[in-house]
Amino acid sequence: MAASLLACALAMAQQGLTPPQIGFFRDSANNLRRLHGISGTFWLGNVTASGVSGAASSGRSAMIVSWQGIRVLDASGRPVGRAWPSAGPALFAFTSEGAPALAWLSSSHELLRWDGLQFERVPIDADALGGTAVSLAAPDPGRAAFLVQRGEQLWRVDLSLLDGAVLGGENIPTAAAPALLLSDGAIVCAGDERNLVIRGPQGAERTVPFSGSPTELTLLGQDWILVESASAPVHSALRLSAAALFELPEAAEMRRR
Amino acid sequence: MIRAVLLAAVLPLAATAQLELTLYDSASNTETPIGSSFNVGDAAVCETLATPEIRLRNIGQNTIQVTTVEPQSGPLRVTGAPLPPFPLGSGALQAMGISFTPPSVGPYLATLNIQGTDSVTQTVYTLNVALTAVGVTAPTLSDTTGHQYCPGDSIDIGRTQVGATVQTSFALNNATQTAASVSVTGADFALAGGAFTVQPGAVQTFQIAFTPSVANRENAVLNVNDLAYNIYGDGYVGPTLQPSIEISGTANTSSSQAQVSIALAAAASEAATGQLTLAFQPAGGLPDDPTIEFTANSSRTINVQVSPGDATAQFTAGDPSACTFQTGTTAGTITLSLTLGGATATASTTIATAPVSLDLATASAATNQIIVALTGFDNTHAASMLAFTFYDGSGKAISPGLIQASVAGDFTSYYAANPSVGGAFALQATFPVSGDITQVASVEVQFTNPAGVTTTPGIPVN
């Protein structure tokens, strides 16, 4: 049966036209802020949470670590489900659709899986990683993929979410921390001086000039990576599909939108 | 004959009877004849002592042409008398005085010598008075070269830029038996450490600081007890900074990030601070766009500064050498205005109206409907029409073909309700589908605003 479109139904009355939202990020004052905008034009929303020590965002949702533990937030910044009582450093992973998936507690070496309402611990042998986990991805529902720092090298190590078994491991040549593993297998990492490298799932690399010194790469939104730097610009946003880097506005005290 | 000649030669030297010198006392209105000597008195070194009025009177019958009045220079000198020659009529008087300004301690001698010639007899009359005076000790002021100054002297403290300070050192030797109080009277001059006292017999070095507030010569007085020294300094405005605003990157299109830096025509000779301000004049009645701002501080003002030797100004937030600003998503003119150490500079960039620009366009199939999501901006804030054409896998348009929607009212309401977004938007349109939704492969979107029509390439339906 041939398809036909019955009508154009622009849902203007509900959410047809909205301010574009990229995701959430932790500002220099450890506040979680909503980031609005498009390539080249960004503006900050109000503080969504304070005392945040780590955050990642897919655009659809966010996972944060604060004194309240590890929490999942929806696209509007509202908490979803139950928090996990841990305030230590963590890595987060989302599904390719942007749904919360996994969290890695770096201090206790625990892997958590989000079931839609709460986190549950996944039994794994942390020693199997063979190094320090620097990034976590959720390539599919049954797998956790880590980027692991082993000495001077970065390795990708995949673990089964069923039993924690190691499903595979490979050295990632030329990659160096800070690095971010994406759900499709792409890797973003610091390159040579003044460069970021986007290494595609098939290994093809694109470089993006970057004047700062990247210290951390985290998910910011759909197609967006947050680049934090020790020197100005402190917060930048990398548009993956365009391999374009933009400076993010720094929060000003007492500023209200 | 010989005798007569001799008398003629001697008489002028001895003839004094027609000229008389007296010391006038104005209080009692009396005159006291001055004999062959006169004690002027004691004066402190550098100080000037002036005698009461001395009167030279012609007591003869004829006018006397006064040809000599001396000394006219030196520590002891005649004051108040006209320079000879001058006539002095019978019975007339000429007032004058003697001043004494000892450059050093000790006795001083001079001869007051007045000569005149009788205009009738040609007799020469001469008056000689031995003047005596004594220079006594006083505080002495000298600079670092040893040069000594007297009260009333003008002393150059230095030349410096307005707002800067120059200091000059001096030494005060108080050889007197009384303490010497030192102070400065006058704006922009000061004694480093404030007023002070030099005890008898002591020598003290000190500095006078000059901090000009104007680009001009300024004067003040250094007081040492009742001795006054005139001091002065010159203020000037340093070489004016000649900053220029340099914009790099794409600043004349919407939704760009451009960098601004501030170059100086010559290295700064002094420190200066200022501000770079960003202003936006929207095109044709459009509202302001708050996303046009510096990223370093999410503001339209950022502080700048230069230090001596700098060739560029430094920003105080973010990257010191270059500051990024967003061009926003509204057509208009962005003007950057700089004030720096009294200098100013401006630069502007105009962003023309443009067709709608899409940053992200996706289409996804859900149960019985296609959802098209468009993210982008319209820098005219006046998008009017949206049109969609769906295609199957073979590239054939799916019925009903072009689907149009008027969106002018929706966008007007949206921008009015969201003044913080500039011209940015996220739009989601849903299309119910009858039949096999999997046959819908792609969608083409046309977006119309006053600047033109934007047509996307085929957006795959996922």
Image (cartoon, rainbow, N blue to C red):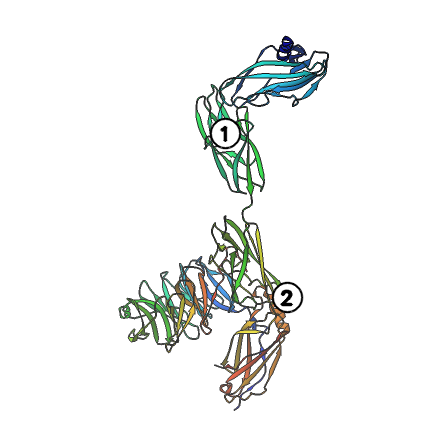
Q: Residue at x 63, y 9 (%)?
A: B2
Q: Is residue B337 left or right of residue B318?
A: right
Front-lying residue, B365 or B257: B257
Q: Is residue B186 visible?
A: no
Give amino acid for label 2: Ala
Up the image or down, B385 lies above or below B345; here it is below
* x and y, in percent, of residue A211 in the image: 43, 63
Q: Which residue is mark 2?
A: B283
Residue B61 in the image: state x and y as whole percent.
73, 11
Residue B220: mark in rendering:
none
Residue named by callout 1: B195
Q: Residue B438 location, x and y as percent? A: 49, 86
Disc 2 is attached to a residue of which chain? B
Left or right, B215 with respect to B63, comes to left
Q: Nearer the viewer, residue B382 or A167?
A: B382
Using a 10 Å C-alpha cutoff, classify the residue at mark 1 as few (fewer than 14 neighbours), some (14 to 19) or many (20 or more): few
Residue at screen point 58% across, 58% down: B346
Q: Secondary structure at mark 1?
A: loop
Q: Secondary structure at mark 2?
A: loop
Q: Seen in the image, is A124 located left or right of residue B11?
A: left
Which residue occupies the extreme top position in the image? B3
